[in-house]
Amino acid sequence: MTLIVPLIVLLLIGVFHLVSGIARPTVEAMTIGYVDELGGFQQYTSQGNITLVRFDTQSGATEALVKGDIKEYFVIPPDYISAGGINRYTLEKQLAASPAITAAINNFLLGNLLAGKVPAATIARIEAPLNLVTTRLTETGDVAPEQGGYGNLIIPFVFGVLLALSIIFSSTYLLQGLADEKENRLIEILLSSVSARQLLTGKVLGMGAAGLVQVAVWVISAPLLLNLASSSVGGFVSTIRLPANFVVLAVVYFILGYLLFAVISAAIGAISSNSREGQQLIGVFTLPALIPLWFTSLLMFFPDNPVWVFFTIFPLSSPVEVIMRVGVSAIPAWQVVVSIAVLVLSIIGTLLLTIRIFRTYLLMYGKRPSIGEVIRSLRSG
Amino acid sequence: MPAVEVSRIVKTFADKVVVNDLSFSVAQGEIFGLIGPNGAGKTTTIRMMMDIIKPDSGDVTILGEKLSESTKNKLGYLPEERGLYKKLRVLDSIIYLASLKGMDRHSAEEKANQLLSQTGMLPHKGKKIEELSRGMGQIIQFIVSVIHDPELVVLDEPFAGLDPVNVELLKGMLFDLKNQGKALILSTHQMNEIEELCDRILMINHGRSVLYGNLVEIKSRYRSNSVLLEFEGEMGEVPGVAEKRTHKGYVELVLDGNTTPQQVLERLVSQRAVINRFEVATPPLNEIFLRVVSKAHE
């Protein structure tokens, strides 16, 4: 996993080059025909790579199509002005006309309808009236160093997914290891060598260090891969940016998120009698971590909804939620501070509970205690 | 100084007193038997000695030191429920578990090789645990419990699942440890093993001590007033014998209250009987066990 994710990104860049190399010839010049039954459509026959050729009759156009001289043709019927219908004929089985052809026909019709009525420059503007360029200003009116846009969302989104997976994987490993040791009774030998507290600490720190190395490799390789991708792939990819403070937040929230889930996993490992049972139980806790991923599109369109504040502060969802929000909008500092504080407090609270659960249930085999029994024993113990 | 001194330990689980005011000590160079019916509190007592769980009250001292993280390295434990990491190789398993007992890798490997060769397991050291038979796995666990040269070794049912060859091998190694001055505690339901190996025993029932002391002394205390006899020919009436029970190959003479075994022997000799075996009957530990337990249930 650690190296696989950066390698996959490298591979994707490679595949992009390969595919774009193969796919490029299809963009070459193309000729399509048209039959003008209405009259007056003679200009603007060159639309980018697409050349439009006029035919007098539909049978002539069909003949050229069958011979392969033209790719397809369309007919402008006499009632076009009132009805607006255009009939298109092609030999290919398609879902719909390709966007390039649709745009070419659209601009050809537009140009001819407006020809002579408005200046050519105006026609060009009517074809593409909106080219939005957004600039984010700071409160002092200067251009902000960090601009918004979809390019900002990509890395945090991918990272949110990776972070959730990484937290869930490492805590599941921990749970599985503990449940296995319990199942094969090794736990008794381990506990006669080290204390329950040492065992818990060792497991959490060991798995945590492994997980942190993984996240560090991803975070460090991200800018390098991004540079490679933006210089070689270009286009939208070159607009992808790492939001400011992203690396710091990613590492901090990984550590805190992991610790919380690790301690919960340890408690569940201690009360379950085998790893399968433990994994069913841990699902209840890993679900909230994934909630921010489900609502990505809502977050994109309504970034100011107060519900995100809740997910930012709720400890089980906050690691992934904060990372995702960083990409969409700026998070007020107080929310980050509160969310970190709540996370830290939850970790301490769960740790204290887990140590008690560890002492009570680690050596009990057989039936898993019910939640009620665990709560009762925590109260009395 | 005793190797282990257990003093008035009490353990309660959810209002149930599992170990109740239990005290005993085990000397260095002694094999000590811990017996009792299922659910008597043996495993809980062992876990408290191994510092896996803490007693509610009372103390356990190892060579005069109270149990702590540092005394854990002086303890060796073969639990009744056994298991190792299935995917790990034999040598790696031993070295890892020895390192938890504070051994460095080099000396752990050296000692592991020595013990593996002593138990005839050296050819298997590169195998994964899951490839071993049950008995072999048990030998590996025994090695794990003694590799760090502990002062106290607790073995819970150490012979269960072993073939007779390995049982003898293990017994030999236990006597070696005893001769090195280690204290061994043996918990088993196989009373013949206890009789063969142990110097002293503790029997617990319902968390309390019901029998404690020297095995020979305990057996003589439970002596029924009878003798076991193997002889040739016919035997007439022997004065002082209240009842004659015939067993396979021998007879048991139950004496009346006023007669001693010595008197019976004199009378038999005077009858000119050919006697091959004459033995004052001490009940097997098994019988004492059953008698004590059933008395507790009355």
Image: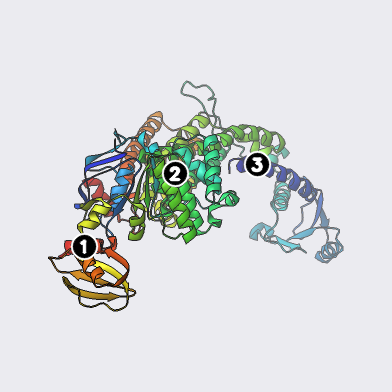
The picture quadrant where one finds residue A217 is top right
Q: Nearer the viewer, residue B230 or A272?
A: B230
Which of B270/A241 is in front? B270
- Give a yes or no on whether discs 1 and 3 share a subunit: no
Where is mark 3, residue-wise?
A7
Q: Distance of mark 3 from mark 2, alpha carbons?
A: 47 Å
Question: Both on one chain, marks 1 and 2?
Answer: yes
Q: Chain of mark 1?
A: B
Query: Three-letter amino acid code at disc 1?
Result: Gln
Query: Which amino acid type is shown beneath numbered disc 3?
Result: Leu
Residue B112's place in the image compared with A251, above or below, is below
Identified at 29% across, 69% down, the residue is: B229
Q: Can residue B52 be seen in this snapshot? A: yes
Which residue lies at the image location 68% right of the left edge and 34% below the top edge?
A228
Q: Nearer the viewer, mark 3 or mark 2?
A: 2
User: Which residue, given by chain and number where applicable, does mark 2 sit on?
Assistant: B146
Q: Position of residue B10 (x, y in %)?
A: 21, 46
| Mark number displayed over residue A26 | none
Q: Are marks 1 and 3 in contact (CB under 8 Å)?
A: no
Would residue B148 appear left or right of A49 to someone viewing this image?
A: left
Q: Is residue A226 above or below residue B173?
A: above
Q: Residue at x 52, y 21 (%)?
A: A142
